[in-house]
Amino acid sequence: MLAKKRLHWQKYSLVILLLIMAALAGLALQIITQLPDTEVLNSYLPSESTMLFSADGKVLARFHQEENRQVVPLSRISTYVQKAVIATEDPNFFHHHGLDFYGIVRAGIKNFAYGRIVEGGSTITQQLARNLFLNKRKTYTRKLAEALIALQIERRYTKEEILELYLNQVYLGHNAYGIESAANLYFGKSAADLDLAESAMIAGLIRGPELYSPYRNFKGAKLRQIFVINKMLEHGLISEREGKLAAIASLDFSPKNLKSLGETAPYFISYVLQELTDKYGEEMVYHGGLKVYTSLDTRLQAAAEKVVTQFLSSEGKTYHFSQAALVSLDPRTGYIKALVGGADFLESKYNRVTQAKRPPGSSFKPFVYTAAIEQGLMPGEVLQDTPTTFTVWPNRWNPGGTWTPNNFDNKFHGAVTMRGALERSLNIPSIKLLERVGIQSAIDVAQKMGIRSKLEPGLALALGASEVSILELTSAFGVFANAGIRVEPTAITKIENRDGVALFNHRTVERRVLDENVAAIMIDLMRGVLSRGTGFRGQIDRPAAAKTGTSQEFRDAWFVGFVPQLATGVWVGNDDNSPMKGIAEVAICPRIWKSYNQIVLAGQPVLNFPAPEGLTPADYLLAPPAAPEPEPAPTEELTQEEIVPEEPLE
């Protein structure tokens, strides 16, 4: 009877065992059929951050979304990092074939003791399999899939290839994926340059990147670092002396790298980012690992930010302006060297250099005078600065009426030369000069020099009634500095893909838009603005030329000036268009321009502007005055269509 019962239970046990084995086999078969093809690793391209570099080789920004990663080959990863990670995560890495059975047994015992999965015993290969192909939920099904994928990976790839993939994939806190991004985030250096102490600190983060972050929990991070060093000693990967020195070494962290857009040139960076997304799309920019080389000079940028901030804080409240902007470019290449788009990028991302368009006031006048020089007039030409009322015929912009403009000082000066009128920024002579040369001629000059904004065809154009951006006005003035040659402004000089293949190389295209002598004569006129005229507070100890400008009721103040190698435009005002107080009298913009140029040009060669060829100084300095213009009638009727806004003051 007992034997019969025993046989009966054996049959049941065998059936149960077979059922369990069948279930396990079915589960294994199901998992195997659903496993991803590890061959994809041959062509696998991880999401990689796009990096932005300044002209002097500094990293300006990293563009990424969910993963900040910079992929590097194993040869560019410190051997200390490799040893630290292996010692901590998988000491038998070079001896197993994807699974560490001793580790699995050890983890199984621990999991049984705790009644849940608390330790996985995963090898580096298993972790790689999980990171690339699986979710991170701790289930037995996932662990089995992880093991099977790890075995496949080990059959197809070398240990070095597996380690390289792992070190470029592993998450290390604060949105840093891969060792290169972590090295930059924590220590401001490349993975190749990490020493033993730094490597041990980063390797210790793998088990709990946010928990052990030195920025959040330095004590915990230090304990993990010591743990890693001890593991390296235990496995004979470093000497005892090396371990002791690393344990007491001071660590130079770079917490500034936690900021998303960087402290330097945020307006410039956002401007470049927009260009990149327009050209390549967001997917490529945020995931494609582009290397973008820009024209920005960090020394000039630092000076620009410093000067703008100083003037905003020291004089902004007194003279009622809350915003300022500055752009500086090399007129010979068009390279944008510095760009400050506003008072505070975190408060307002609106770029007042590239996006804002404001009335330039009298800083538009050089285009009118250039048209006059092109038509053969010389700086000694006499103009009349007398009261004049213009009758405006109705048109699509203006209902018509009369317009009696005034000068900035509300005075009239009689007969004046073109030179004197520009230096003192007199309105009446400039309006009459525009009428004489033709409105369209002045528009044509401005457009060929680089003004892209719409210019309304009226005599008020002489006073800067049409709105322009600081970038286009500064770039247009660069034509004077570059002897009449137009070069389009640019912020990007080269773009490479993740493999270092050039996708874009900027080519400087020069286009002559002004005769050399016309440019030289205009430079001479505008040098007088600095030496004797409205811009005298912007004088610097080298040849320079400039023009001031203010709009109606002091809502805008401008100063655009240049030396042969650098053109710089400055604007101050308020976003709500409210008027400023005393802004012209204290010459805020000329002083900002001067302070900036004194910093950035220090130690730079003093370059001279070319003199007009084939002309004697008398031709353009002391030209004989023309016959006096007859006294105008009290009212001068104009037949051409024009707009007449509120009159800009200067």
Image (cartoon, rainbow, N blue to C red):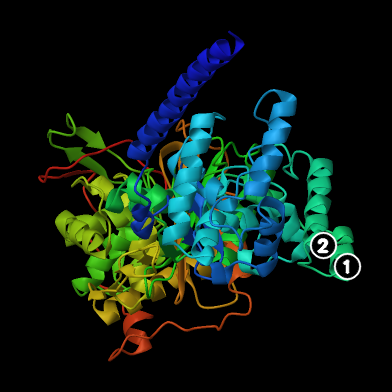
State the CA–CA distance, disc 2 to disc 1.
7 Å
Residue at 49% across, 69% down: 55
Q: Is disc 2 in contact with disc 1, using a CB cutoff of under 8 Å?
A: yes
Where is residue 196? Give x, y as percent: 76, 64
Left/right of residue 108 with respect to residue 530 in the rendered view:
right
Location of residue 592 with respect to 520 vertically, above or below? above
221 vs 620, nearest the viewer:
221
Location of residue 239 with respect to 3 vertically, above or below? below
Q: Residues within 10 Å of mark 1 (few under 14, many from 20)?
A: some
Left/right of residue 213 with respect to residue 229 in the rendered view:
left
The numbered disc on residue 240 is: 1
642 vs 575, nearest the viewer:
575
Is label 2 in a helix, a strand or a loop?
Answer: helix
Is label 1 in a helix, a strand or a loop?
Answer: helix
Where is residue 43? Give x, y as percent: 34, 58
Residue 22's image quarter?
top left
Residue 424 appearing in the image: no
Residue at 67% across, 62% down: 81
> What residue is shown with label 2?
233
Give the mark nearest the N terminus, 2 or 1.
2
Residue 87's image quarter?
bottom right
Circle count: 2
